[in-house]
Image (cartoon, coloured by chain):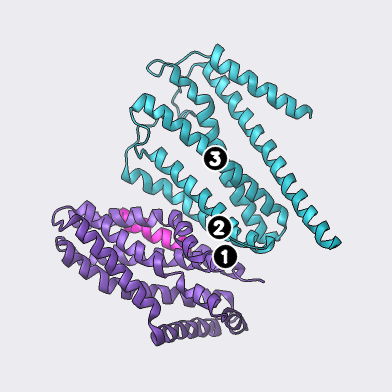
Chain colours: A cyan, B purple
Amino acid sequence: MALRVLLFVWIAGALLAGFLWAPTVENLGETTRVLYFHIPSAWIAVLALAWSMLHSLLYLRTRRLEHDDQAAAAAELGILFCIGATASGSLWARAQWGSYWNWDPRETSIFFVLLIYGAYLALRSAVEGDERRARLAAIYSAIAFVAVPFLMFVVPRIYATLHPSPILPQQGEKTGMDPRIRWSFLAMLVGFTGLFFWMMSLRVRVTRAERRRLETREAGA
Amino acid sequence: MPPNGSSSVAAVWAILRKECRSEWRTRYGLNAALLFAVATLTGVSFAVGRLPDRTDLLSALLWVVLLFASLASLAHAFVKEVEGHTLTLLRLVASPTAIALGKLLFNLLFLGVLEVVTVPLFLILMGGPPPRWGAFLLVLGLGSLALAATTTLVGAVVSQTRGRGALFAAVSLPLLMVVLAAGVSGLRAQWDGNPIGPDVRLLAAYAAAVLGASVLLYDHLWED
């Protein structure tokens, strides 16, 4: 309970800081502020994918359904944040680059991540039986885990990027980012990560409760 | 089944022979796939006409035709076992890995036959410039290997779900984007006289990675 309140206050504070305290960047104007939603969402989309794949592999090793619950919950939330990152990025691209969608490498890779999430969830919805669903979804997840790194090599070969360079400084280079923007952004990043894990724990608890209810009903019948 | 090497190879070989024989009896899968490939090719050809100097379009369209034909047919190897209720018997006589490897070899052979018919027809109908055969076949071969490895694993997974056919294409596609991108870029490079090294390496690495992961995952395919 205390953690939930802290999370709420934290995100509200980071939002206020981002909109009222942090300045905007030259040339970008007010569109700077997409930073506080867009990058944390994209980060969660990738984190959720990694989390889901990790738990899929753990499921194949241990055969404990808790790992499958984690993998499924992470994928469901991941697709949500992924859509958030794609939509906010697309709006920003419209404002800055003049078009909503241009197959920029970043757009291409996030689209690919969306496709994998979609395929994974479509596969899950088409399998009957908890064990079998968990096993087949985990196999798919493992093979997607192998495919994802290749995209980083293949996408830049096709298109050049206009996307702003990553926030973290390259070696020996200064970001030149205003510290107020950086702190607001980092606070949002932490807030989003907390939000993701909190939402996921809720989702996992709901799944477990549903399973228990089914079990008791079957036991009663 | 004892897990020693020679009998596993024998099992894979037996599965492959059994696949070829049962396919040859009806030829239903191959006929459907060939007709599908030719229909796609005709559609593409009617839609855009001859493209003698557009190597970018030619490479993309060739892969689209091949991708369509394989997505329409490669799940067949597993789906027919499920629909004919023969999978249980098959699992009694061979290990999951032997079954999957046998099916993978069969799918590769299937894809090869498909390409022997489709690719020359494509080159003739679309009026493309003569390819550099060595490079052309290398890109095509490695791309087919990656395609077969991916679709065999996904086919085995999808055959155990509801709505197998529809799901197969949707679920395979995200995994095939890399093959598609590198394959198109490689074919284009060989037509334009550019080096194909990077694309060939990418295709080979992807095929090896998917094959390696598949061999580890095949054991988990059937348990109930």
The mark nearer the N terminus, 2 or 3, is: 3
Which image quarter holds the N terminus of chain B?
Answer: bottom right
The residues tagged by marks 3 and 1 sit, at their Cα atoms, a distance apart of 27 Å
Q: Regarding mark 3 in the picture, which secondary structure is present there?
A: helix
Which image quarter holds the C terminus of chain B?
Answer: bottom right
Q: Nearer the viewer, mark 2 or mark 3?
A: 2
The residue at the point 41 percent across, 39 percent down is: A107
The residue at the point 71 percent across, 56 percent down is: A65
- In the image, what residue type sits under mark 2? Leu
Q: Are marks 2 and 3 in contact (CB under 8 Å)?
A: no
- In the image, what residue type sits under mark 1? Thr
Identify the main secondary structure in magenta: helix
Q: Which residue is mark 1?
A: B161
Chain ID for label 3? Answer: A
Q: Regarding mark 2 in the picture, which secondary structure is present there?
A: helix
Say if labels 3 and 1 share a chain: no
Chain ID for label 1? Answer: B
Q: Is residue B204 magenta?
A: yes
Q: Which residue is mark 2?
A: A123
Is there any visible trace of residue B145 in the rendered image?
A: no
- In the image, what residue type sits under mark 3? Ala
Q: Nearer the viewer, mark 3 or mark 1?
A: 1
Is there any visible trace of residue A190 in the rendered image?
A: yes
